Amino acid sequence: MLNADPKSCMYVGDNLSDMQAAKAASMTGVAIPDPNRICQEFVEAGAQLVCASLQDFAREIGLEPAFI
């Protein structure tokens, strides 16, 4: 058990059910959907951030995406 406050955690996923799980767990939901999906669906499912790629997500949280 990490004993982390869920509100300080991010749940990264590529599915609508991932965003629903993040919301239910009081975590920040971050969606990196398939490019053919409509981003609004993820927002409606609870995503607080939608990124086009892992590189974009890394930049969003202040990391240099060179590792990807």
Image (tube, rainbow, N blue to C red):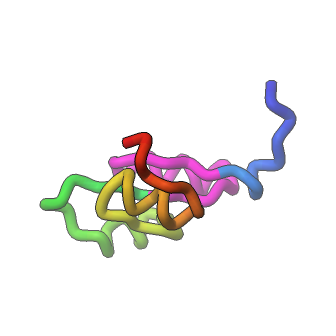
Extreme residue in the left direction: 36
| Residue 16 lies in the magenta stretch | yes
Question: Would you place residue 45 above or below residue 55 in this image?
Answer: below
Q: Is residue 13 above or below residue 41?
A: above
Q: Quadrant of the N terminus?
A: top right
Query: Looking at this rendering, what residue extends furthest in the top direction?
Result: 1
Q: Position of residue 51 (x, y in %)?
A: 37, 64
Q: Quadrant of residue 23?
A: bottom right
State the extent of the magenta-drawn residues as a range.
10-30
Q: Is residue 40 left or right of residue 7?
A: left
Asked whether residue 42 is drawn in magenta, I would say no
Camera-nearest residue between 47 and 65: 65
| Residue 53, image x, y percentages | 32, 56
At 58% across and 63% down in the image, what residue appears?
62
Q: Position of residue 44 (x, y in %)?
A: 41, 71
Q: Is residue 3 left or right of residue 16?
A: right
